[in-house]
Image: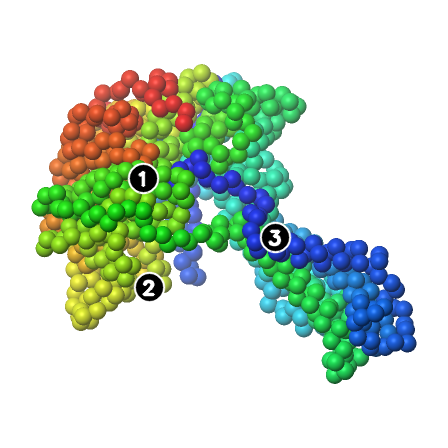
Amino acid sequence: MTDPGPDSSAPRRAVLPRSSPKLVTGLALITAIILFGVTGPLFAGDPDAINDIGLTPPGGGHVLGTTQMGQDVLAQIAYATRGSLYIGVLVGVMATVLSALFGIVGSYAGGVVDEAFSLFSNVMLVIPGLPLVIVISAFVPPEQRGAWTIAVVLAITGWAGSARVLRAQTLTLRNREYVLAARVAGEPAWRIITVEILPNLLPLLASQFVFSVIAAILSEAGLSFLGLGASNSSTLGTMLYYAQNGFALQRGAWWWFAPPGLIIALFGCGLALINFSIDEITNPKLRAVPRRIRRPRREPAPVGRPSQDVVVSVRNLSVTYGNTVRAVKDVSLEVRRGEILGLAGESGSGKTTLAYAINRLHRPPAEVTAGSVTFHHRDGGDTDMLALPSGELRAFRWSQMSVVFQGAMNSLNPVMTIRAQLEDVLTTHRPQLSRSDRRARCARALELVGVDPARLRSYPHELSGGMRQRVMIAMAMLLDPQVMIMDEPTSALDVVVQRGILREILRLRDELGFGIVLITHDLPLLLEVSDRIAVMLGGEIVECAAAEEILARPRHPYTRRLLESFPSLTGERGAFVRTGEATGGAR
Amino acid sequence: MTTLDVQDLVKDFRIRTGLRGRRLRAVDHVSFTLSPGRTVALVGESGSGKSTIARIIARLERPTAGQVVLNDDDGGRVSDRAYRDHVQMVFQDPFSSLNPFHTVEHHLIRPLLLHGQARTGAEAREKAGDLLERVNLPARDIVHRRPHELSGGQRQRVAIARALAPGAKVIVADEPVSMLDVSIRLGVLNLLARLQREENLAVLYITHDLATARHFSDDILVLYRGRVVERGPADEVILAPRHPYTRLLAAASPDPEARGRSFDIDAAAVVAAGEAPAYDHRIQS
């Protein structure tokens, strides 16, 4: 409900990787090698033609010199590259088909089929690949050991890892609502798999394909080098095998073994680069975000204290995403001690961006382009938040101004006890505290939010969502901050639980007197609990007034529209009810 | 008169805790009827079993006991094969209920063809356009777009059009607006209400929001841990709740008029309230 970026500018979901230096380099390498492999043999002479000029260094009639038997190395490489590519693609196709069959079909079918397929893949996975390949290759008589035999053996030993990855991904996809919707629509299972699920797995499949091609070419080279490769075909591996047998290294005939090795290395490198780019489709977080740490273009202007009880002043703050989207425009507001300032707005209104920027938690490409955030200490000093060096900022953040994020209850570390996580905050920020003091403070913090201190020994999964959220609030209060920023702290919770947490927040506010910025889309909630409400629309605060004032005399049309969006539980039935589309149009 | 009878529905889930299995009763002997032109709201907190009931009606789950019977205009029971011609579902999350890979058109053409509402591709495309117009979307503009190019409200309208495509007479709407921005929620609910009137649809509206349940449904069933604790006409259940759990839910809803009221609700009170015997306004009043 509060994604910071506006929805309309969401990048088009890519099927093809985005152009990047990595991708271009990778594609260039691969294209060059494939072109060489495909067209090279057409121009090169007979690779097996024996000459009496054995082991000639490069130059003259033989661009890359000759082998011991006087064969042309360039011609040999051309044919060997073609052979290696052939096996690589064969294995890639077979392994991908096998992994798709066992990974996707099994996990979609579920139940016994899934268990059986999954068991089979796991068994195949623990069988050590190369030794098995060696055994199988050794078992097949050399005269029957063609490229196809090797390819089948490599495919059989190489698909299981991909199948597991595909299975995991399919398991999440099959419970997506669009797959359920297709089932409700009555689509047959084969169509759901091929039309609804498979396209969404394409990036993953492509990446698995590329990976198995690399693996196949390397394994084949290894096998051939050991003399267990395809007998009647020439690959880069067989070339190395003959070079080894011909004592190329000892005789210093580098032109015999270096070129095939280099081609293998470059091919692997190129495919790996392509794979990086494909991975970025499935996981956009891998995309390198240009990290410009640029000082905000603004005058260093910490604001003087407007009045004694103000704790944070925000003046004319603007935040942009990558110079194009202005998420927060010229926002000014004040937070007072002991008050709850409600920040109401819908997705894309900039309310979360604003909260992050106040705390300087925003990340590139978000950037503060103008304005100031000043923190007024209880004892009289002022701090310019935007000018704070990062070391001081870190200390400042938790102890003076803390944040409870949206869905914070899911951000507890699952493998640490509650106590360890609370104490972690204290050991970082209050290293002078003794162990017993730390424990006492943690217990006290949990008591404050209404959680039994015995729960300190629990792990997060042993607590309910409401309790975890309370723990997060306790953590935010641990260092007795003067301001707490809460971004949808209770939106994911049931109303009854939400009530309990709000009660604790209000009680603590009365006891400890910190200021609270409460961000939510739930206007009725803000109207009931907050002192003042700021309404955000399109990055601007369109109205800011006391809660009673907003309820009784909303000035801005958007505020009125928001108010009308919540039908009253017990009041009169409004005109909007079940009469057609009077309010809210298509958006 | 297509009516859907939910009869004594029970659903148990097996939960594996270590080696031992444990049984969790998600739905506990729930019965109700959906009839044309009427909306029944299922209200409850997370874990109350309301979504499980929706999934059983949409045949995404099998009930442990009890049955869902669909009767057609003549009162005869609709065959399993034709069941999905009549019963369709609108999902909660419009961001995941449309396939990111496919266009809006794909989402509408497939059900039209599958359920014999269109014979040829051209006919299906034309009908898809009509469906989009009916949910107030500019068909020509939108039909070739992919889900990420639409706003949340537009996506949910497409999802509603998809549910109507097979010619369904019973619509199960599982929290259809809870993921949408507040200012467009009423618009979508009103759209559903208008379509219901035009088509004489039977609607099951599943929500945790008491206020919209009251305003957009005829009857309300309040669920607590799989059990119906209170049922009756919408206004009676909300304005004169008789069951302690319903009262608790109503008291916990934010109320701008009640600033500064006390907040005292604790977990024990909820459990105690949930244990009270069920109340049926139609029988007991």
**Which residue type carries mark 3?**
Val
Instruction: From this view, report whether residue B5 is shown above or below residue A411.
Output: above
Secondary element under disc 3, as helix, strand or loop, is helix
Give neighbour class at mark 3: few <14, some 14-19, many 20+ (Cα, 10 Å).
Answer: some
- Chain that bears disc 3: A
Comes first in the chain, label 1 or label 2: 1
Q: Amino acid at mark 2?
A: Met
Do the numbered discs 3 and 1 sit on residues whose CB atoms are within 8 Å?
no
The residue located at (15%, 50%) in the rendering is: A376
> What is the number of the mark on residue A24?
3
Query: What residue do we see at 10% from left, 43% from top?
Result: A307
Helix, strand or loop at mark 1? strand
Whole-percent x, y for residue B163 in the image:
50, 28
Depicted B73 relative to depicted A460: above or below? above
- Residue B74 falls left or right of residue B28: right
Give x and y (percent) for residue A483. Answer: 19, 50
Q: Which residue is mark 1?
A: A328
Badge 1 sits on which subunit? Answer: A
Q: Residue A527: percent from the left, percent from the top?
A: 20, 34
In space, the residues marked 1 and 2 are separated at their CA atoms by: 37 Å
Left or right of B2 in this view: A343: left
The answer to whether the residue labelled 3 contacts the one labelled 2, judged by CB atoms less than 8 Å apart, is no
- A322 horizontally vs A277: left or right: left
Report the quarter where the N terminus of chain A lies. Answer: top left
Q: Pointer 2: residues within 10 angstroms few (<14), some, or many (20+)?
A: some
Q: Which mark is residue B246?
A: none
